[in-house]
Image (cartoon, rainbow, N blue to C red):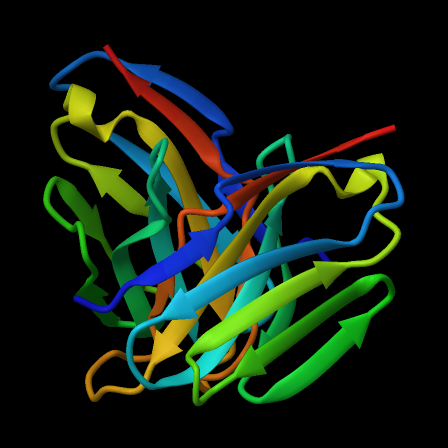
Amino acid sequence: KNEVEQSPQNLTAQEGEFITINCSYSVGISALHWLQQHPGGGIVSLFMLSSGKKKHGRLIATINIQEKHSSLHITASHPRDSAVYICAVRYNYGGSQGNLIFGKGTKLSVKP
Amino acid sequence: NAGVTQTPKFQVLKTGQSMTLQCAQDMNHEYMSWYRQDPGMGLRLIHYSVGAGITDQGEVPNGYNVSRSTTEDFPLRLLSAAPSQTSVYFCASRRGRVNQPQHFGDGTRLSIL
């Protein structure tokens, strides 16, 4: 079964800390997504990447295709970054129609 | 630009009742999908559609029905609600090309008593 594993499950940080969330997957993919789910429940797409690195503000996403691993980094964390961060992948196999497989999420809490 | 709109936001049903969760998008996206989110699990795909008139099953389709008569709308029907269908439901859409970001609705929290 193609799976997406995230670590850690829960993460508590102090404001200003550098945060890393990890995602690993099992077989070849065409793209990896990082999503943010706010405490109110809405889900927002942060990044979509298939190689290298992307940066948006204080958020950085990297992917290593050979190691089947991605990381989401948050620099200078802030309480408003508190959310669940979800990794999702689109596997390379025929008939998938590009459907996403989701990890269980990492719940981040940033304390002031 | 409203994006993906889901209604209702909350609903309580009794076992055996039927209902339709509504999903509409105004971005002319070809691909639409329904997911359920349960505690301790990742989002799971229920049904999806790659265009008007075309639907297909996802990972957990049993007990649900969908149709796609227009590009904009993708309703999800619960035929005979069961407590196991208590969940948070998300609708999402994206452009037809595979590697495009998905846009999510705000979710529908559904409780089956």
Q: Nearer the viewer, residue B32 or A95?
A: A95
Quadrant location, the N terminus of chain A: bottom left
Quarter of the image for residue B17 reads top left
**In the displayed structure, would residue A102 be above or below residue B112?**
below
Residue B107 point in image, percent of width and height:
49, 38
Residue A79 point in image, percent of width and height:
82, 35
Residue pictured at 87% horizontal, 65% vertical: A57
Count the marks: how many? Answer: 0
* One can see residue A48 in this view: yes
Q: Nearer the viewer, residue B88 or B4?
A: B88
Quadrant location, the C terminus of chain A: top right
Q: Does B89 sit left or right of B4 as displayed? A: left
Residue pictured at 47% horizontal, 58% vertical: B92
Residue B77 point in image, percent of width and height:
24, 41
Quarter of the image for residue A67 reads bottom left
Q: Does A41 sit left or right of B89 as displayed? A: right
**In the displayed structure, would residue B88 be above or below residue B43?**
above
Residue pictured at 55% horizontal, 73% vertical: B28
